[in-house]
Structure formats: structure tokens, C-alpha cells
Image: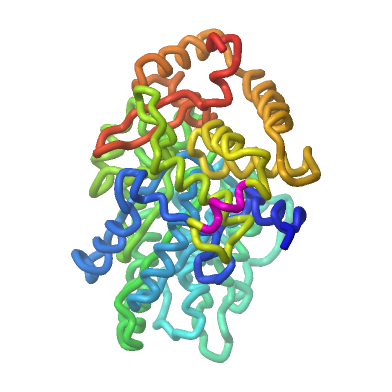
């Protein structure tokens, strides 16, 4: 049966996150843990379920944007739910303005999402939260906004008149929706909440998390886990006083991120690992960040990494033949590509970056508009992608890139931070040790000697 070109194109959509509780997505999933330096998600699950099921935990999870963190975190959610945990997973970019994030914004987003997920559970009185939210409403409705209105009655911030209790998700949601799109309001709310971070944490812990966990355990659950995805995407522009936003949130305010009394997993920008403040960051959190590295396709000495190459090919073939076994898929390569070497070439050029591979493949399908896909068209797609990538690279950065290619190392230098954030340099793991290499698409550039 011929492959449906449109179906194959849709299956390789690079913006799509796999949800492993769906049968189709489960067939697309490839477990790369054997070549990524171990099963990071498995170890994280053990920490929550075996070692510290009844104590709060806090883990930072990082890796290149697009390397598969969200898919792995959704796998963690599914496995924890099977083991009786109530898991709140959300993408922080839906709740926060990523160019301007403060610690109070993150805490409010977590409180909103947790209370939203517990709508069937009746919690006790929330006096501290009521006071904070009503204070926030006074700020929103002050002369600063240019609109003079009365302070809302409790019913306006999500209180059920019948029960006289605050629906936190509605109350917080109304506030966060207003401030997300208005930087002036956002600044005023953060000025109001910043001195009250301790009160805000106490309100979340005492009036939301602790009673929620107690109710969940009465229902037979083992605990509460909050997974805050996409926090690694916050912009690194300086705050008004000059501090880069990523360092401000994870280093200066990192202690507050750890103080919520439940199991927490946050995604963190990979570039912070190469910040001069990284040592300080590791002191703010109970353990070092967990890194999801690239899938290695070659060893530091240039030899092909056979296992990594096999798994990366399977990721491509599974999108075309999800119902076949891995060995059977290999017999079908000629139905999609003009040769097995062409598929290997695609994998090598991705550098082991999952989303970049899908992005190249997706563009290739659109360009070719027919199967099998040919090597010539792939090279055209690569040249076009390379031309886009090299435009912002300075001569100093080319020097750094040539250094990485030769030494397979980086340092805690701001130049390297940008190269890693821009996905010009990738990190790999082998036996607990890291090594680095240049994005293979750039290696063909004349500035690299290609």
C-alpha cells in the first residue's frame, strides 16, 4: 500500500508534541534513553515515587529547545498517574508573558493551574489568598489604569455566593489574563506582590497545596506533582535594573521556586548551565539540573555512533510506518527515500536534535512533493537552512565555533551561551561526561572551512 504523502507530512510536523496516552503518538515514540546518558525520566520518577513520596521535591530539567523535553515530561506525567499521583502539567508560555516574567507570576500560574485541576475537591477557607487577590484587584482598578472603577465585591473574583469560598482558578485567572497583555499593569501587580512573596507562598502552601494533598490522599492518591513546562523559553533580555531575566528568575529568585510544598519539575534554559552564576544556581536548588542531551550520531573522534543512528532512523520510519516492527520498517526505506544513505545523511545533518530533524524532513517533503525523497532536494533544503542560520553569526562567534569543532568543549562564556541558545552548538553525553559539537548544518559553511 502506497504511503500517503500528506499523512506523512502531517506526522512529521515539528511543532507537534507527542502525547503518549494517545495510541497513535505512542507508536511514534522512540526511547532514546540508552544513548542519552541514561533514563533521566525514570530516575526522576523513582525520586518522587520511591525515595521521597511524602516530601516536597524540586527538579530542574533542561536541554536544547526542541530536543524532546516536553514529550519526556508528558511520559513522566503518564507514568506518575499510573502510580497513583495527581499530576498537573502545563505549558507556562500559555500563562506568562515570556519576555517579562517575575517570581510572583510563576507562583500565581502554579496556584491557578493546581486549583483548576482540583475543581471537584472542596478546600477550606482561603483568607490569605482572598486578601492578596483583592489587593491585586485594587491595584488593577486604581487610577494607574486610567479607568476608575469600584473594587469588586468578592463575587467578582470568583467567590461562590452559595459557599462563600474563593474559586482560586477564576480569581487568579482574571488577574493574570489582564496583566499578561499589559506591561504597565504587570509592573504594578509585581510591585504590589514582590514584597509579599512570603505571604503568597504561605497562602499557596497552607490554603491550597497542603489541604489539596490531604484530600487527594483521602481519595487514595499518593501525592501531588506539578510540572511547569516551557519555562526554559523565557527571554533573556535584561530587567529594568540590568539583570538578565533568566539569571534573575532562576538564581536570584530560585529559592522561592523551591518553597512550594509538593513535587515540582521546572524546565530551565540550557544556556544557564554556561552562565557565570551557574554555581550560585546549583546552591539555590536541592540538586543539579537534569540535562536531556542530543541523540549522538557520531563519537567525538568522528566514528559513527551506530546505536544513535539506528534510533534516529527509526524515529523517521515510525512516522511513515507506525504499525510495523522496527526490523520491518528498515525494509521499507526505499519507499520513502532514494537510498538508505540519504536517510542517514538526514539524520547526521540534524545533529541528533529531534525537532530539527523533523523540520528538515517536513521542508523536504514540501519541496519535493513526491516519494521517494531524493538526495538532491535534501541538499537544497540544507543549503537554504544554512543560509538562514549564518546571517546573524559574527566573526568572533565563528572563531568560537571553530574552537568547539576542534576541542569538543565550551566554557562559561557569554559567547557560548548565545551559541547554545541559538542551537549552533549541541551537547552530548557519554558515560556521565559531556562533549560538544557544532550543528552539522554549519559545518558545510565556508567560514568553518567547509
Q: Quadrant of residue 269?
A: top left
Q: Position of residue 247 (x, y in %)?
A: 41, 35
- Number of numbered markers: 0
Q: Where is residue 10 in the image (x, y as percent from the top left)?
A: 70, 55
User: Residue at point 41% right, 50% down?
Assistant: 32
- 82 to the left or right of 169: left
Q: Is residue 144 visible to the viewer in this orientation of the structure?
A: no
Pick the quarter of the image with the N terminus: bottom right
**Magenta-drawn stretch, dominant element (helix, strand or loop):** helix
User: Residue at point 45% right, 45% down?
Assistant: 310
Q: Is residue 250 visible to the viewer in this orientation of the structure?
A: yes
Pick the quarter of the image with the C terminus: top right
Q: In which quarter of the image is residue 294?
A: top left
Q: Give the range drawn in magenta.
A: 328-333
Q: Position of residue 37 (x, y in %)?
A: 31, 44
Q: Position of residue 66 (x, y in %)?
A: 53, 44
Q: Is residue 22 above or below residue 108?
A: below
- 241 to the left or right of 258: right
Q: Can residue 110 be found in the magenta stretch? A: no
User: Residue at point 67% right, 39% down?
Assistant: 338
Q: In which quarter of the image is residue 161?
A: bottom right
- Colour mapping: rainbow
Nearer to us in this view, 124 or 74:
74
User: Residue at point 35% right, 48% down?
Assistant: 60
Amino acid at each position: 500500500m502506497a504511503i500517503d504523502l500528506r499523512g506523512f507530512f502531517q506526522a512529521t510536523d515539528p511543532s507537534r508534541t507527542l502525547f503518549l496516552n494517545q495510541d497513535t503518538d505512542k507508536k511514534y515514540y522512540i526511547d532514546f534513553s540508552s544513548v542519552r546518558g541514561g533514563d533521566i525520566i525514570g530516575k526522576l520518577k523513582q525520586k518522587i515515587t520511591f525515595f521521597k513520596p511524602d516530601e516536597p521535591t524540586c527538579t530542574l530539567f533542561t536541554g536544547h529547545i526542541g530536543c524532546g523535553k516536553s514529550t519526556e515530561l508528558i511520559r513522566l506525567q503518564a507514568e506518575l498517574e499510573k502510580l497513583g499521583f495527581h499530576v498537573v502539567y502545563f505549558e507556562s508560555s500559555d500563562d506568562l508573558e515570556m519576555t517579562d516574567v517575575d517570581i510572583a507570576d510563576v507562583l500565581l500560574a502554579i496556584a491557578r493551574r493546581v486549583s483548576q485541576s482540583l475543581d471537584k475537591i472542596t478546600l477550606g477557607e482561603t483568607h490569605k489568598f482572598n486578601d492578596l487577590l483583592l489587593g491585586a484587584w485594587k491595584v488593577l482598578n486604581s487610577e494607574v489604569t486610567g479607568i476608575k472603577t469600584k473594587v469588586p465585591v468578592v463575587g467578582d473574583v470568583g467567590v461562590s455566593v452559595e459557599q462563600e469560598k474563593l474559586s482560586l482558578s477564576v480569581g487568579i485567572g482574571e488577574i493574570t489574563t489582564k496583566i499578561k497583555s499589559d506591561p504597565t499593569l504587570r509592573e504594578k501587580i509585581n510591585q504590589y506582590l514582590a514584597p509579599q512573596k512570603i505571604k503568597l507562598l504561605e497562602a499557596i502552601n497552607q490554603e491550597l497545596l497542603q489541604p489539596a494533598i490531604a484530600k487527594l490522599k483521602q481519595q487514595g492518591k499518593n501525592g501531588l506533582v506539578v510540572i511547569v513546562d516551557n519555562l526554559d523559553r523565557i527571554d533573556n533580555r535584561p530587567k529594568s535594573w540590568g539583570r538578565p531575566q533568566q539569571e534573575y528568575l532562576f538564581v536570584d529568585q530560585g529559592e522561592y521556586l523551591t518553597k512550594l510544598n509538593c513535587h515540582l519539575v521546572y524546565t530551565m534554559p540550557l544556556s544557564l548551565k554556561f552562565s557565570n552564576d551557574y554555581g550560585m544556581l546549583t546552591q539555590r536548588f536541592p540538586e543539579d539540573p537534569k540535562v536531556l542531551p542530543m541523540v549522538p550520531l557520531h563519537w567525538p573522534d568522528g566514528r559513527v555512533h551506530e546505536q544513535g543512528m539506528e534510533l534516529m532512523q527509526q524515529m523517521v520510519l515510525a512516522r511513515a510506518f507506525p504499525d510495523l516492527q522496527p526490523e520491518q520498517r528498515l525494509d521499507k526505506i526505499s519507499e520513502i527515500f532514494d537510498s538508505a544513505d540519504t536517510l542517514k545523511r538526514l539524520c547526521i545533518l540534524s545533529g541528533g536534535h529531534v525537532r530539527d530533524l523533523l523540520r528538515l524532513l517536513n521542508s523536504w517533503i514540501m519541496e519535493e512533493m513526491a516519494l521517494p525523497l531524493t538526495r538532491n532536494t535534501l541538499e537544497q533544503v540544507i543549503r537554504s537552512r544554512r543560509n538562514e542560520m549564518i546571517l546573524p553569526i559574527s566573526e568572533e562567534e565563528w572563531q568560537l565555533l571553530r574552537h568547539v569543532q576542534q576541542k569538543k568543549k565550551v566554557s562559561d562564556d557569554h559567547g557560548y551561551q548565545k551559541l547554545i541558545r541559538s542551537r549552533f552548538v549541541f551537547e552530548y553525553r557519554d558515560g556521565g561526561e559531556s562533549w560538544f559539537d557544532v550543528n552539522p548544518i554549519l559545518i558545510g559553511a565556508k567560514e568553518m572551512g567547509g
